[in-house]
Image (cartoon, rainbow, N blue to C red):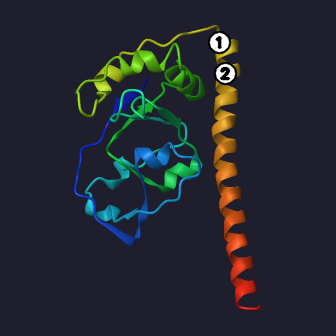
Amino acid sequence: TERVWWMTRFKRVFGEDGMPYMSADELFSLNPTITKRVLAEQASNFEDYMVKAGWIVMACSGQTYGLNGSVALMDKQHEACFFSHDLVRIVAKADRIRPGYLFAALGHPRFGRPLVIRHAYGTSIPHLDPGDVSTIPIVRFEKGLEDQIADRMEKAAELRGEADALENAVAERADQVIEDFLHRK
């Protein structure tokens, strides 16, 4: 990887004029409804709480067989959001491994995630540390196979973003049709 880190906590102030805020719960939900908007300017380094398409984020707290260790591949839609401090950010080293393959490897139910969650510490709410996450061995294959896997995972992330946008547009249109009907427009 190029970099594996997490952000520090800070007091979040929410308001209607803020940026869409995503916690781990929202990130790992299907097309989550963003209910919170954080006033980002309050954090001196608010840009650091944002992500870039192609990054991987990992839930770093929660129950060991719940969200903890779950990974998501970021897309263009995610770049507009302010993310919780409670997510490890992972940037693949482009000349060594593609983000889609690293995402697939880290999230694999047999060869990835068990290697991740074995590092969880704490009893009530287990946590993962970026230092431990950066030491997780990644199963490697020949470049052609890794590229095929990466292509599919990266396309899946792109399609999920498009599906979310389409679902939101359909819901907005349905709301408008119902509103028009109720007001006899």
Above or below, 37 relative to 128: below
Q: Amino acid at mark 2?
A: Ile
Percent coordinates x, y for residue 15 in the rendering: 36, 71
Image-quadrant location for residue 97: top right
Residue at image location 70% in from the left, 13% down from the top: 144
Percent coordinates x, y for residue 57 in the rendering: 44, 36
Above or below, 117 relative to 179: above
Quadrant of the drawing holding the N terminus: top left
Q: Secondary structure at mark 1?
A: helix
Mark carried by residue 149: 2
Residue at image location 34% in from the left, 61% down from the top: 40
Quadrant of the drawing holding the C terminus: bottom right
**Side of 128 where 36 appears, left or right:** right
The residue wearing badge 1 is 143
Above or below, 153 relative to 43: above
Depth check: give the residue in front, 161 or 55.
Answer: 161
- Find the distance from the CA under tag 2 to the CA under tag 1: 10 Å
Going from N to C along the chain, the mark reached first, 2 or 1, is 1
Q: Amino acid at mark 1?
A: Lys
Percent coordinates x, y for residue 27 in the rendering: 48, 46
Percent coordinates x, y for residue 36 in the rendering: 41, 62
Pointer 1 local density, CA inside 10 Å: few below 14, some 14–19, many at least 20 = few
Image-quadrant location for residue 152: top right
Mark 2 or 1, closer to the camera? 2
Image-quadrant location for residue 125: top left
**Side of 158 where 71 appears, left or right:** left
